[in-house]
Amino acid sequence: MTGKDEMHQYDAAPLRVLFIGGTGTISASCVRLAAAHGMAVTVLNRGENRAGRSLPPEVEQLTGDVSGDTSVRAVLGDRDWDAVVNFLSYDEDDVARWVALFTGRTSQYVHISSASIYAKPVLLTPITESTPTGPNPPLPYATAKWRAEAAIARAHREQGFPATVIRPSHTYDDANPPLPGGWTVVDRIARGAEIPVHGDGTSLWTLTHAEDFAQGLVGLLGSRRAIGETFHITGDDVLTWDQIYTLFAQALGVQPRLVHVASELYPVVAPEWFWSGEFVGDLGHSAVFDNSKIRRFVPGYAPRLTFERAVKRMLDWRSAHPESTRGDAPTEEILDRIVRAYHAAHQAYADHAPALEDAS
């Protein structure tokens, strides 16, 4: 057997991959890239896609309630996959469910964690995968993700569960700007309203477009070497928060009106807002990452999008999808409340400054 016939003898079947999620900020880009690489891609979710992220027609869609074991088992039947990527696993109880469901049904289970589990403040930069992690009291989301990681590590260590752990850090796409408050903040910038920025706006932050993240994740699928390993996959574009907001303003052709608010004030003024805990427990600290490990495992990993270019893409998306990129009233009210608190604090100090100086 020679020539073309001989080549077919060694053709491998496409890698069969199940994505749990698949239409979210991070996952949609990963699904598209996996399909483009010739993988046989299946997506399991509730069938909702509010942001309009389209998936390739060759992707198989399974619809089920991922929060219920009965629904998931009914949809999956007795099928198995070469790799399973779970974007929706949140806490340790959730991990136990998925481990029980996929034990013996996949050669690789990719658990999507979060870089927010690194202990803050980080004492040595850049952050590597061996940087200490731990519970984050101001940020319940990070604490839940940390406990979930501990549970998946136990499953690998004690049961041989074939887990690979991925820690994204503030990943965004064209439909989801990485600003606390999202499109509402973009609207405020565009109309010249004041924008609250945590701290003094100079902490360093790493942003990663989902298309760049997808390079690393898809490159790990099917890798036996990646079993039992943990990776963060981030961009190399590091900016201050003032720069992040200002790049949006420049692309919109306006001057940004930035108001610097102490991070600790957010939970006092807006305790119900998700981002208030983020400012104290995560975003208020600098985060710069060493991506040498993912590059060792995926030599072709090379983020291509600078944030400056990505901002223009996000604003193009905003123009093309006005129905899904409007600001929302509840977020607007929270941002107004924070700005008022900032000005009230300044006025209170001005009113009492003489007395305070005499007391000192």
Image (spheres, rainbow, N blue to C red):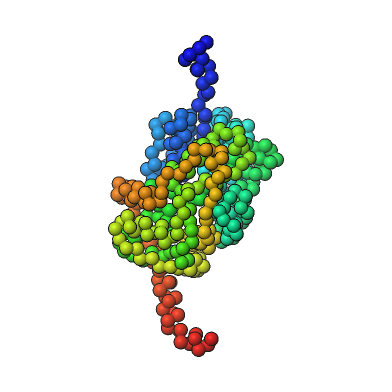
The residue furthest right is 158
The residue furthest top is 1
The answer to whether residue 62 shows anywhere in this view is no
**How many marks can you see?**
0
Left or right relative to 224: residue 243: left
Location of residue 331 (image quadrant): bottom left
Q: Is residue 322 above or below residue 44?
A: below
Residue nearest the observer in this picture, 51 or 217: 217
Residue for point 55% across, 53% down = 126
Residue for point 43% across, 76% down = 346
The residue furthest bottom is 358
Left or right relative to 167: residue 37: left
| Residue 301 image point, x, y percent | 49, 40
Residue for point 41% across, 49% down = 306
Q: Is residue 39 above or below residue 354?
A: above
| Residue 161 image point, x, y percent | 64, 37
Location of residue 187 (image quadrant): bottom left
| Residue 241 image point, x, y percent | 44, 60
Residue nearest the observer in this picture, 165 or 68: 165
| Residue 176 image point, x, y percent | 40, 50
Q: Is residue 208 above or below residue 274?
A: above
The answer to whether residue 199 shows anywhere in this view is yes
Residue for point 53% across, 63% down = 280
